[in-house]
Every structure is written in C-alpha cells, then in structure tokens.
Image (cartoon, helix red, strand yellow):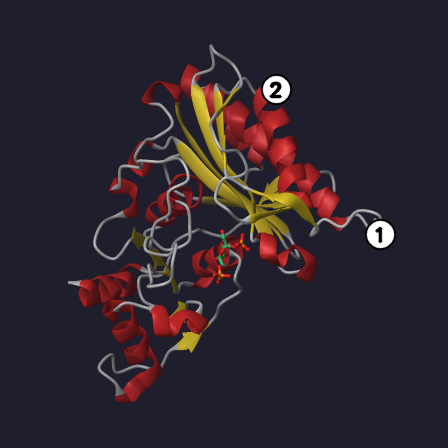
C-alpha cells in the first residue's frame, strides 16, 4: 500500500515526461486539497453555490465554487510547469508555459448543481502531451482521474497502467484505499436521469424499458436504479460495485450529443473505465476513439460494467 507521493515518485523516475505527469498530478492533488477545505469550512459569508452572474463557455451558470476551483487549479498547474490548461470554465485554452510538455484538461467542479445540497461533487482531469494540441483523442491521454468531495475526499487515478484509489487524510495526504479497482463485468444496476424519458431515442428507451420489465422482460433479470446527478459520484459508485451510467443524446434542444463534455469529462472517465476493465461508448463508438472537433463539444456517454455496456450497444445496432 503506497500513498500518492510514493506512486508519483516512482512514476517520475521512469522518464522526463513521466516526471512532468507526476508534477501535474501532484499539483492537481494540492488543488483538490484546497478545494476540499473550501467546501468543508463553515463561512456564512461565502455562498459557494451562488450564481456568479455569467454563464461559462458551455452556457451553464457559473457558481462561485466553479470559479474558485478554476482559479486554484490554474495556479497549481502554472506552478507545475504545465504548457496549456483547458477548462470547462474558460472559452479558450489558457497558455501557461511555452516550454511545458503537457496539456491538462479539467472540469474543475463537476456536479455544480449539487454544491448547495451537501451531495458529492468533484474535479475531473485529463493529461495529454502538448505536442498533440488541445483536440486529441482520449486514446492519447497519458493519465486521467477525478477527485470526489463527499463524505470522504478521494482520488481515482490512472497513469496508463491500471487504476489506483486514494483517500485524503487530515493533512492533505492521499493514502491508498487498499482496494483493487476492477469493474465487475456484470451488473443489474443502471443510472440515468429518468425524467428525460419522453425525449430519449428508441435504443435507450428500449433498454430502460427492458430493465424496468425485470425478470418478466427480455433481459430476464431484475434491475436496481441509482442516480446521484453528479457524474463523479455516480462514477465512483460504479467503480466500487459495478453498474452502468447513461447520459444519452435526446430530442431536447442542445442535447443532440448528450450533455457531458468529451474532452474534460467523458475522456478521463472513459480512460479510467477501460483501465479498470469496463467499457465506455456513445452507443456506437468507443469514447476514447472519438476525434474531438471542439474543446467544449458534448458526447452521449454510456459506461460501466463491460457485459452490460455490450447489452446497451446491442440495442443501438
Ligand atoms: P452539473 O450540471 O451539476 O455540473 O457535468 C454535468 C453534470 O452535473 C454531471 O455531473 C451530471 O451527471 C449531469 O450534469 C446531471 O445532469 P442532469 O441535471 O441533466 O441530470
């Protein structure tokens, strides 16, 4: 059992690029410790869920904590020598160091609509080589992960060879959680925002109908449903005990490619999923094989236990 510092030290010894990756991950861990502290500190004068008045690049309302988290991450990535920062909160790439070797993409505060509700929220990140430019396939990621600010502050991390789980202690140190992160291939648990049912396209509607039919339906087994409404919280549960997550494309205006963002939400989660033995798709194509055309583009996102994702892909073909 090793804490994050030891893992990063070993990684850094492998090559110059790995050393830069280790510095970037360390910077993100420092940022996460600060964000976690901000969230936990009682301060009636600071309403972290207050709308800041402007919408972000994607048209979502920016909350005070979105902006604070983005500032903290920018500062840490600058200190870590990163070349370019891609953020959900910024319209365009932020150049940090012309001679840096890495790009870091991040959703600084995922689950913003849950800030005021004391429900788990998080920070998602993806690390790529700077030479590839901002729009790279997820397959090219060097490392990826997400922090969850919940009852525990945690980190799921892949450096390209499996997935590690850490929990932050009171000193801001990320300690190995002592479990093997491996997604069970089978599951009978799905997560989807069912209020959008009337907008879904036929494949997703048919799959969820079959789940709800339970043992009497064509899938011939009973299902349970869980939906937190924070991607990081739903993903953490799925890494822990299996399941599938669906945020599909639907007929609503602005949802023709789903809701979640490819570059800094779906790609990092998909890399973790594949590294843990699961599968991530838009229904027809592997998330990690999609070539992004735009920094803030959305993607239909389905991931989780391999065999169940294959069932959902079957409904799309
Ligand atoms: P949020 O808008 O609160 O930041 O990333 C966007 C996200 O949350 C995900 O964390 C979450 O899974 C999804 O949106 C929830 O969307 P719905 O409210 O449409 O269900």
Q: Residues within 10 Å of mark 2 (few under 14, many from 20)?
A: some
Q: Position of residue 228 (x, y in %)?
A: 53, 64
Q: Is residue 70 above or below residue 300?
A: above
Total numbered labels placed on residues in the image: 2
- Left or right: residue 150 versus residue 214 is right
Question: Is residue 158 in view?
Answer: no
Residue positioned most to the bottom: 216
Task: State the residue in front, 44 or 118.
Answer: 44
Q: Residue at x 31, y 85 (%)?
A: 213
Quadrant holding the C terminus: bottom left
Q: Residues within 10 Å of mark 1 (few under 14, many from 20)?
A: few
Q: Is residue 248 above or below residue 12?
A: below
Tell me which corner region of the image, top left, top right, bottom left or bottom right, holds residue 283.
bottom left
Q: Position of residue 9 (x, y in %)?
A: 53, 25
Q: Position of residue 90 (x, y in %)?
A: 53, 33
Q: Is ligand 1 within 8 Å of the beta carbon of the residue shown at mark 1?
A: no
From the image, tell me which residue sits under label 2: 79
Q: Residue at x 33, y 59 (%)?
A: 249
Q: Using the numbered discs, state the Cα–Cα distance from disc 1 to disc 2 in whole angstroms.
A: 31 Å
- Left or right: residue 65 versus residue 90 is right
Question: On residue 93, which mark appears?
Answer: none
State the SS at label 2.
helix
- Left or right: residue 313 versus residue 25 is left
- Left or right: residue 209 versus residue 46 is left
Q: Is residue 217 above or below residue 37?
A: below
Task: State the residue in front, 112 or 54.
Answer: 54
Question: On residue 44, which mark appears?
Answer: 1
Residue positioned most to the top: 99
State the SS at label 1.
loop
Q: Residue at x 59, y 57 (%)?
A: 113
Q: Which of the two discs, 1 and 2, labels the residue nearer the N terminus?
A: 1
Q: Is residue 24 above or below residue 178?
A: above
């Amino acid at each position: 059992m090793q804490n994050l510092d030891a893992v990063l030290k070993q990684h850094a010894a492998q090559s110059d690029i790995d050393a830069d990756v280790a510095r970037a991950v360390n910077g993100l861990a420092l940022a996460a410790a600060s964000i976690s502290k901000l969230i936990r500190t009682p301060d009636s004068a600071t309403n972290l869920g207050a709308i800041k008045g402007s919408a972000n690049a994607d048209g979502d309302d920016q909350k005070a904590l979105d902006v604070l988290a983005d500032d903290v991450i920018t500062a840490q990535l600058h200190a870590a020598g990163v070349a370019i920062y891609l953020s959900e909160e910024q319209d365009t790439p932020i150049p940090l160091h012309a001679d840096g070797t890495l790009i870091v993409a991040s959703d600084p505060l995922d689950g913003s609509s849950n800030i005021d509700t004391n429900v788990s929220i998080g920070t998602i990140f993806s690390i790529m080589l700077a030479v590839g430019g901002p729009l790279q396939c997820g397959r090219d990621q060097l490392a990826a992960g997400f922090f969850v600010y919940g009852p525990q502050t945690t980190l799921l991390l892949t450096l390209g060879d499996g997935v590690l789980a850490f929990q932050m202690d009171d000193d801001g140190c990320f300690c190995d959680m002592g479990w093997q992160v491996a997604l069970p291939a089978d599951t009978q648990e799905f997560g989807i925002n069912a209020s959008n049912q009337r907008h879904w396209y036929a494949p997703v509607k048919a799959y969820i109908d079959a789940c709800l039919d339970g043992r009497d339906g064509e899938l011939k087994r009973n299902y349970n449903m869980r939906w937190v409404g924070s991607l990081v919280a739903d993903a953490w549960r799925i890494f822990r005990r299996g399941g599938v997550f669906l945020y599909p494309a639907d007929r609503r205006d602005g949802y023709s490619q789903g809701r979640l963002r490819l570059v800094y939400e779906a790609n990092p989660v998909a890399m973790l999923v594949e590294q843990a033995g699961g599968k991530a798709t838009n229904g027809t194509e592997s998330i990690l094989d999609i070539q992004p055309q735009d920094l803030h583009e959305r993607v239909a996102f389905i991931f989780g236990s391999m065999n169940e994702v294959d069932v959902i892909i079957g409904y799309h073909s």
